[in-house]
């Protein structure tokens, strides 16, 4: 394999989105001229809806994203695309967006007109970050797989959680470390036994299917509970379960009856 093929395999795929075609063409030219070792442009768009479709179809590693678009903002666009592992370099003529941009998967913020040295630095930085993260994730997966006893029950398995904010990255954790999950709109919060919380960009219904059903139970439209952390189920002021950590979570009436049947309890 020659050097050019190695570079091609290592490049990050990228899509460029800008409201103005002249800006888009100039950015594309700069990337091809100065950042070709790091970035491979696989698509461009000047239209909001077209950009959403293009990103969902090709799922690039990196987005170069203008903020003021024809049918909304770049921030709106990020909420429309399917969740997956990507990063963003925002490109804008308005520095008033800088603070808000870092609520998203932001690797860098470039001001228009684009400074070539700033562009080169940003591309080099994000290239190194993504490559390092992929290596780390791979090693993490190998470590977790190696640590799982094949005789363990499913409750001691591993689940991948696609997390936010920052880069959409997947964290692998043991299911036994999950106390409960809480739905927050389109996201899911994971509350762990060590007191930490992870926020996933997938909804709670997806995790209801993934978590082992012999240990995790959907007690409410908002909550999935690890049955091992429940110490008491009460009927005072509505149905609720008391947890080992002192918290109390609500149980819907329908789910209470299902839980009673599941646990072979008397009503």
Image (spheres, rainbow, N blue to C red):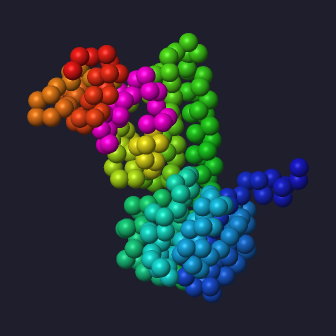
Asked if residue 267 is positioned above or below residue 116 in the image, the reply reads above
* Residue 229 shows in the view: no
Q: Nearer the viewer, residue 225 or 26?
A: 225
User: Is 14 on the left or on the right of 75, as rendered?
Assistant: right
Among the 4 quarters of the image, the one containing residue 197: top left
Asked if residue 211 is positioned above or below residue 110 in the image, the reply reads above
Which x, y percent locates residue 67? 47, 75
| Residue found at x 56% / y 33% | 140
Which x, y percent locates residue 65? 54, 71
Q: Is residue 215 magenta?
A: yes
| Residue found at x 70% / y 78% | 29
Which x, y percent locates residue 115? 57, 78
| Residue found at x 31% / y 43% | 222
| Residue found at x 35% / y 53% | 185
User: Is 60 on the left or on the right of 9, as rendered?
Assistant: left
Residue lying farthest left? Answer: 237
* Residue 254 shows in the view: yes
Q: Nearer the viewer, residue 69 or 82?
A: 82
Q: Nearer the viewer, residue 64 or 243?
A: 243
Query: Bounds of the magenta span?
Result: 208-226
């Amino acid at each position: 394999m020659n050097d050019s093929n190695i570079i091609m395999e290592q490049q990050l795929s990228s899509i460029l989105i800008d409201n103005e075609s002249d800006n888009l063409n100039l950015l594309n030219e700069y990337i091809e001229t100065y950042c070709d070792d790091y970035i491979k442009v696989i698509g461009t768009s000047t239209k909001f809806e077209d950009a959403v479709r293009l990103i969902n179809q090709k799922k690039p590693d990196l987005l170069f994203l203008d903020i003021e678009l024809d049918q909304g903002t770049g921030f709106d666009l990020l909420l429309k695309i399917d969740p997956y592992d990507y990063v963003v370099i925002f490109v804008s003529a308005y520095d008033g967006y800088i603070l808000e941009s870092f609520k998203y998967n932001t690797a860098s913020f470039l001001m228009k007109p684009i400074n070539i040295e700033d562009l080169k630095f940003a591309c080099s930085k994000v290239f190194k970050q993504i490559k390092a993260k992929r290596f780390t994730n791979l090693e993490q997966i190998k470590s977790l797989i190696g640590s799982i006893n094949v005789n363990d029950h499913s409750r001691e398995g591993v689940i991948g959680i696609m997390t936010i904010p920052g880069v959409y990255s997947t964290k692998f954790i043991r299911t036994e470390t999950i106390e409960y999950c809480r739905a927050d709109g389109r996201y899911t919060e994971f509350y762990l036994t060590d007191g930490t919380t992870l926020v996933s960009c997938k909804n709670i219904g997806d995790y209801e299917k993934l978590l082992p059903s012999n240990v995790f139970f959907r007690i409410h439209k908002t909550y999935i509970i690890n049955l091992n952390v429940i110490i008491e189920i009460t009927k005072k002021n509505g149905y609720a379960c008391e947890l080992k950590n002192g918290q109390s979570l609500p149980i819907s009436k329908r789910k209470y009856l299902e839980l009673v049947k599941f646990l072979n309890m008397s009503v």
